[in-house]
């Protein structure tokens, strides 16, 4: 939570506090004894909000504005062992998942620490999980990268969708791809992302077996000229266009005073 305190997603801390209060009665007592009027008002409002609303209403708010004495939430948690235990209970990674997992992390993500996501992937690997790790390809989006976290839902999805389709089809995750690529370079370039998108129609199951094939990419061609294949290729093209636009134009618009919707 400390990583987003004061960020555009600061309101999400209210989600966490409300959730902990609902699950741990002792946390409710701590909150009631330490939050000020602004904090009570914010927690009440946030209980009925969604992500887009919190960014508009509580973006860049500090928890010091909510807690008596100007303390941050992190400082308050350290004062109460029961609060620290409740927060520690939320740690992901103690038990390895039993199915292949993919983590895409961005170097410029200001909301989820880059090292934190990679550490989770490494942790699961040491417990025997089949982990597929990728670095997000986006450059810094916005003045200080404040838009990267949301923009990565587009760019990261280009790697994630093929990964999920493979799992639905029961395809094995290659051993050379499991628990490797910790430098985040291989398979994380714009070319690799484009390749993943352009090959999606064929391995997605959207193209019927035996459909007529025609040139689409590479030296031999790997696309489909059947109607279902063409539709699937168009879907992939739209996804690629959206990702490219986010990477190329948002920084320019931000520099001109335009506030991106994310």
Image (cartoon, rainbow, N blue to C red):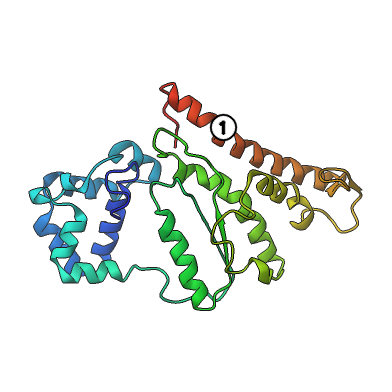
Q: Is residue 74 above or below residue 49?
A: below
| Residue occupying the point 19% across, 62% down | 77
Residue 82 at x, y percent in the picture? 18, 71
Residue 114 at x, y percent in the picture? 43, 54
Q: Is residue 153 above or below residue 144?
A: below
Q: Nearer the viewer, residue 221 or 203?
A: 221
- Residue 227 location, quadrant: top right
| Residue occupying the point 50% across, 31% down | 250
Q: Nearer the viewer, residue 108 or 227?
A: 108
Residue that carries the numbered disc 1 in the rendered image:
248
Residue 71 at x, y percent in the picture? 13, 51
* Relative side of 123 to 182, left or right: left
| Residue occupying the point 86% across, 47% down | 221
Residue 213 at x, y percent in the picture? 90, 49
Residue 150, can we see it? Answer: yes
Q: Nearer the viewer, residue 45 or 199?
A: 199
**Farthest top residue?**
256
* Relative side of 148 to 24, left or right: right
* Relative side of 159 to 29, left or right: right
Determine crowd level at label 1: few under 14, some 14-19, many 20+ residues with C-alpha closer than 10 A: some
Residue 173, can we see it? Answer: no
Looking at the rendering, in which quadrant would you find the C terminus?
Answer: top left
- Residue 225 location, quadrant: top right
Q: Nearer the viewer, residue 52 or 216?
A: 216
């Amino acid at each position: 939570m400390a990583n987003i305190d004061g960020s555009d997603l600061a309101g999400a801390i209210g989600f966490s506090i409300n959730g902990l209060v609902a699950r741990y009665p002792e946390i409710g007592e701590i909150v009631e004894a330490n939050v000020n009027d602004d904090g009570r008002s914010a927690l009440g409002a946030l209980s009925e909000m969604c992500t887009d609303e919190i960014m508009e209403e509580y973006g860049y708010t500090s928890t010091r504005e909510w807690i008596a004495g100007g303390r941050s939430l992190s400082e308050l948690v350290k004062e109460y062992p029961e609060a620290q235990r409740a927060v520690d209970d939320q740690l992901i990674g103690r038990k390895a998942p039993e199915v292949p997992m993919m983590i895409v992390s961005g170097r410029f993500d200001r909301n989820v620490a880059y090292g934190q996501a990679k550490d989770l992937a490494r942790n699961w690997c040491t417990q025997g999980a089949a982990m597929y790790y990728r670095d997000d390809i986006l450059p810094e989006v916005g003045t200080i990268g404040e838009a990267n976290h949301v923009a990565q839902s587009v760019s990261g999805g280009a790697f994630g969708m093929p990964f999920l389709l493979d799992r639905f089809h029961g395809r094995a995750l290659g051993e050379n791809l499991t628990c490797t690529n910790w430098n985040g370079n291989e398979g994380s370039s714009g070319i690799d992302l484009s390749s993943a998108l352009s090959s999606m129609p064929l391995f997605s199951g959207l193209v019927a077996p035996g459909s007529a094939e025609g040139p689409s990419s590479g030296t031999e061609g790997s696309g489909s000229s059947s109607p279902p294949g063409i539709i699937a290729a168009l879907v992939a093209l739209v996804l690629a266009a959206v990702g490219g636009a986010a990477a190329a134009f948002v920084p320019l618009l931000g520099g001109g005073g335009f506030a991106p919707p994310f």
